[in-house]
Structures are given as structure tokens and as C-alpha cells.
Image: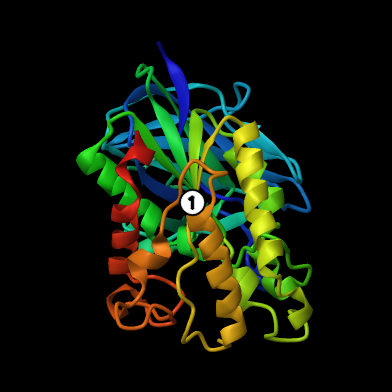
Amino acid sequence: MSKWVAIWGSAPSYTAAVPARYAKDVTLRYNMRSLLGGGKMRLHLNNLYGREAAVITRVFLVHGDAAVPVTFGGETACSLPAGAQVMSDEIDFPIARGEDFAVTMYLGDMTPLHTGTKHYGPLSSFAFAEGDHAAEAALPPEHSAPTETVYFLDTVDLLTEDGQAHALVCFGDSITAQSWPDYLALRVLREGPEHLAVVRRGIGGSRVLRAYGYMQHRHYGSRGIERFERELSAAGVDSVVILHGINDLIHPGTNDLRPWSELPTAEELIDGLRFYVRKGHEMGLRVYPATIPTLKGWNIYVPKRDEIRHAVNEWIRAQSEADGFVDFDAITRSADDPDSRDPECDVGDHIHPSLEGARRMAEGVPAQYLK
């Protein structure tokens, strides 16, 4: 029996504030790997944070030397009104499990770039080029450059004949926008199950309880409790690993725009995580909160932040409201000082995991959560 399942995703947010907010005569290319096999695809494009309409001139699905045009209501151009999401037509595009493909977009006329998200990781290879190269197998190296930002592309769905196929979402902040979901996808490709897709929904700077109303950090996005239902409402999604809350702890007290008054109590942050569990269960999802990793050594560290983190983590480990939990704190902390990061798992800022740390996190997700 055929079914639609999300096989790739991003978490739309405001793009970071820069003087240039428009593009013209530019090709965007987003390379990805399918964890499932199927015969048709459809794309969800998003202009959620746009202040004006954006027109995507042409979109292609590229696999090897083949470029298949994507249509929207039979038209090759896609008009995205401000604040809107548009789903493409169903496109014949056979793909096997483990095969690489790309989504390419050509922006012919002046196009506002107000909605986008940064991704990193071994499976996250994105680029842009001058001119129209959307139907080409690869961007010309002399006219292209890498980018970390995914503009407009929200979700990729695959129509698969595997009746067991489903998707797990990795939900959170910059730690999830970085490498561990890619390493989890690589683990699934290596070990199975063959019917599981991994979808990333991470926004750098995101907090559970608060958003940012000022321009410099507006790209940190909506509050997690506002994002959650929208980002989990994707085809075939039936489970979620939630790693969220570290920015609620480390951002307050850093400047006048992030005052100490924004520091939550442990009870407030736990209530936010409880919201995820309740809402996830209402949506029919299995919900796995993850412990918050260490933050000692961060340039604005004070023990008060850690006291809250410990209380939240104790609740995560002891609670029976969710369907389980993932102990990312235990996986990445130092054996000599449990409040510090294992140096091999630290990228250097004492907050974000190194590639080795991300790999250990992916390997530490219990196998029964992936079934």
C-alpha cells in the first residue's frame, strides 16, 4: 500500500539580518539523501516569514544527469504569498533508498529572501550559483559557492510502497540544526530499519518559551511551543526526539535585549517540555525528550544556569509522561567533571558538539525508538 512520508525537512525561520535581502538570477541547490525508496515526490515551499510575495521561477528534482521539472498547479513557476506555504504537484521521480538527489531552484527576478534556515552536517550540502543552472547535474564551480542556508524549502515528501514507512523528527535548536540528525540518518542507512526516514527541525538560537522581537536575533525564530505543532505536522511522522532548552538558560543576562528576567525557573522550563509531550500525544506521536547537555565553560556561564539544567534533566530522566528519553547529557559529558563536556565531544565553545560528539549522540538514541 502506497503512502506519503516526509524524507527531508527544515524549520523555517526569519533569515539572519544582512543588508542584502534580495536575490536575482540565482540558482539554489540543496543536495540530500533519501532514506526510503519510492516513485513520486512532492515539495512544500514556505514563505512563512516573508513580508512580500516571492516567485520561484523554476524548480527541478535532479538525480544523476536527469532533471525533472516540478510544477505547482500545472505551472513551472511558484508564487509564494507572504506568510504562505505551497505544495507542489506530485512528480514522477523514482529514487532508491540511500540514493542522492537534489532540489534546485532558479530565482529569475528580484526575490525577497526572508524565510530560511541554516543546516550543517555530513548530509547537508547546499550551494548557490550565478545564472540559471537549475536543470544541470551540478553547479559550475567557477560560478558557484557553498551556503549553509536553505531558503523556501520546508519539506520533501516521498510516495513509497512500503506500508511500514514512517518518519522520526529531530526537533530543537542549533545543536539539532548541526550534525547529529545527519549522523542518525547515516546510522539508519547502515543499520536500519529500512522503513524509517529522519527529518530535521532545528533553528539556531531557538528557545522553548520565548522568541526574539528585535532584528539582530529575530532569526532565532518562534517560540518552540508555537513551532512544534506546525513542524511536526508532516506526512508519515509518528515520533520525535526533542533536544530543546539550552538557549532558555544561556541567553538571559547577556545584554539589555536579553535581560535576566527572561531566565526561566526549572518549573517553567519543565512545563514547556510537558507541553511538547501533551501536544505530541494529541497528534498521535511517540515523544522522546532529551536531556540538556553541559554548558560549563560557555563565555557567560554562571552556576545558576546549571542548577536549572540539572533540575530539568532530573525531571526528564524520572518522568513517565513521555514515551522514553534520550540522555544526550550523559553521552557527551566529561567522565572527570560531569558538569563539563568531554573534550572529544566539544566543538570548542562548550555548548555545541564536535563531529565526534554528534556521532555519539546519534549512536546513543535507543534502537527501540527507531523501529
Residue 343, given in percent of the width and then of the height, sits at 30, 80
Applied colour scheme: rainbow
Question: Does residue 116 appear to the left or right of 329 in the view shown?
Answer: right
- The quadrant of the rendering that contains the C terminus is top left
Question: Does residue 360 appear to the left or right of 174 in the view shown?
Answer: left
Quickly name the residue at label 1.
27
Mark 1 secondary-structure assignment: strand
Residue 177, given in percent of the width and then of the height, sits at 48, 59
- The quadrant of the rendering that contains the N terminus is top left
Number of marks: 1
Q: Is residue 75 above or below residue 210?
A: above
Residue 145 seen in the current view: no
- At label 1, counting other C-alpha atoms closer than 10 Å, the crowd grade (few under 14, some 14-19, many 20 or more) is many
Where, by quadrant of the figure, is residue 230 drawn? Answer: top right
Q: Is residue 130 above or below residue 10?
A: below
The amino acid beneath tag 1 is Thr
Give the camera-side residue of 248 and 349.
248
Residue 196 seen in the current view: yes
Which residue is most to the top?
1
